Image (cartoon, rainbow, N blue to C red):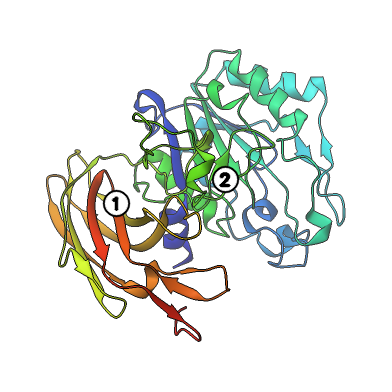
């Protein structure tokens, strides 16, 4: 179950030219401070408070480096970290890095076909894990920049409990995978995904910022985006982020069609039923997380741009289609008003699933003094 959870939660964010999956027989350099650490895969509040002793309890599990060796053969996978973390409690932000250590990684890369750079954070939690700057460390950025100059393709593996700013090195990579904190089987899951033995199906559970001072939640206010389409708000627009909430690629492609609702007009006590057809238009089997978003087109308080109201993950063989049905209680479309009470207001709602859009209309305003709303 831990392995399956890791497989289905690791997210493919970039795959230029279909560089992934990596072909069998490829000579791989595994580098970066997160490449050979179980502590990084588990994070804090795991085996110990700050996760600093996780390596002592996880010798029978595989790091990313060890998992790639098992997947591709030890002779095809080389490890040269370039940057390492200083071990021990209270030192999680400290790194070992010299020009010589980076040069060793660069030299190793020249004898390989592809570079898997495992970057991010050491384990941490609570106040000891606070940072003043969410940029990825200069050591790790310098390592990636030096490796990219070799001309060998770079796969970035992002491993940490929060996004770190990488907008200056992301363009240097041909592929990017976000594993977050995948647990003891995270390395095994990543190796299976990189080889194509498993298919990516994870979706990003947060908005990944591009700049240090531009943090945003996925449900940002419509007033935070410039008007488009001749003054009409474009609900498909995104604030300037690296990757939006809910984003995630696959080794196959999916097409959405025929989004519909069982009723175009509803009241506060109704349950809306939506259905949409999803088709696997690629050449391999895959899973797709079908996400339903609602947008309140007018409200007495400035509404969120969109809210995730329902979702379901489905499996599809190549060429297969399924009709997905998603139920949304009308109360899920309510918001907290000026008086601190849940309210559902009369008006139109925009429903979007994939690239499909439909409209529904609430015919009655209702305010709950003590609502039974989760």
Residue 69 visible in the current orientation: no
Is label 2 or label 1 in front? 1
Quick one: SS at disc 2?
A: helix
Reading the image, the residue beneath label 2 is 64
- The residue lying at 87 percent from left, 55 percent from top is 90
Q: Earlier in the sequence, mark 2 or mark 1?
A: 2
The quadrant holding residue 19 is top left
279 horizontally vs 91: left or right = left
User: How busy is the neighbourhood of tag 2: few (under 14 within 10 Å), some, or many (20 plus)?
Assistant: many
Q: Residue 293's spot in the image, x, y percent?
A: 35, 56
User: How busy is the neighbourhood of tag 1: few (under 14 within 10 Å), some, or many (20 plus)?
Assistant: many
- The residue lying at 69 percent from left, 36 percent from top is 212
Q: Residue 91's spot in the image, x, y percent?
A: 86, 49
The quadrant holding residue 94 is top right
Residue 152 visible in the current orientation: yes
Q: Residue 202's spot in the image, x, y percent?
A: 41, 51
In terms of depth relative to the viewer, which is nearer, 96 or 369?
A: 369
56 horizontally vs 289: left or right = right
Quick one: SS at disc 1?
A: strand
Where residue 121 is drawn, which disc sits there? none
153 horizontally vs 120: left or right = left
Contact check, label 2 and label 1, Cβ < 8 Å: no
Vertically, is 56 above or below 278?
below
The quadrant holding residue 142 is top right
In terms of depth relative to the viewer, which is nearer, 160 or 345?
A: 345
Reading the image, the residue beneath label 1 is 352
Q: Residue 42's spot in the image, x, y percent?
A: 64, 59
* Label 2 to label 1: alpha-carbon separation: 37 Å
Question: What is the quadrant of the N terminus in the image?
Answer: bottom left
Vertically, is 199 above or below 45?
above
- The residue lying at 52 percent from left, 58 percent from top is 185
């Amino acid at each position: 179950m831990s392995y399956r959870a890791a497989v289905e939660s690791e997210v493919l964010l970039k795959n230029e030219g279909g560089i992934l999956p990596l072909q069998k027989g490829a000579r791989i350099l595994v580098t970066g401070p997160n490449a050979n650490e179980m502590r990084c895969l588990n994070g804090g509040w795991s085996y110990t408070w700050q996760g600093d002793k996780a390596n002592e309890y996880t010798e029978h599990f595989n790091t990313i480096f060890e998992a790639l060796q098992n997947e591709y053969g030890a002779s095809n996978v080389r490890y040269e970290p370039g940057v390492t973390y200083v071990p021990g409690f209270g030192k999680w932000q400290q790194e070992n890095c010299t020009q010589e250590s980076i040069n060793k990684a660069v030299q190793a890369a020249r004898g390989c076909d592809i570079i898997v750079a495992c970057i991010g954070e050491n384990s941490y939690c609570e106040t000891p894990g606070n940072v003043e700057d969410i940029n990825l460390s200069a050591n790790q950025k310098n390592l990636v920049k030096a490796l990219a100059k070799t001309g060998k393709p770079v796969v970035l593996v992002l491993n940490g409990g929060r996004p770190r700013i990488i907008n200056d090195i992301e363009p240097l990579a041909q592929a990017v995978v976000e594993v977050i904190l995948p647990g003891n089987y995270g390395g095994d899951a990543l190796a299976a995904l990189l080889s194509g033995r498993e298919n990516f199906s994870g979706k990003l559970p947060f908005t990944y910022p591009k700049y240090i001072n531009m943090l945003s939640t996925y449900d940002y206010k419509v007033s935070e985006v410039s008007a488009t389409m001749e003054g009409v708000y474009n609900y498909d627009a995104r604030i300037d982020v690296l990757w939006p909430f809910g984003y995630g690629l696959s080794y196959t492609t999916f097409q959405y069609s025929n989004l519909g609702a069982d009723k175009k007009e509803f009241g506060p006590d109704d349950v809306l039923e939506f259905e949409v057809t999803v088709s696997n238009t690629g050449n391999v089997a895959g899973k797709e997380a079908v996400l339903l978003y609602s947008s309140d087109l007018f409200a007495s308080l400035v509404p969120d741009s969109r809210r995730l109201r329902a979702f379901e993950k489905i499996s599809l063989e190549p060429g297969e289609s399924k009709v997905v049905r998603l139920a949304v209680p009308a109360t899920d479309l309510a918001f907290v008003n000026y008086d601190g009470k849940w309210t559902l207001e009369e008006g139109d709602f925009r429903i979007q699933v994939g690239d499909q859009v439909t409209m529904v209309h609430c015919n009655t305003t209702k305010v709950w003094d003590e609502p039974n709303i989760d």
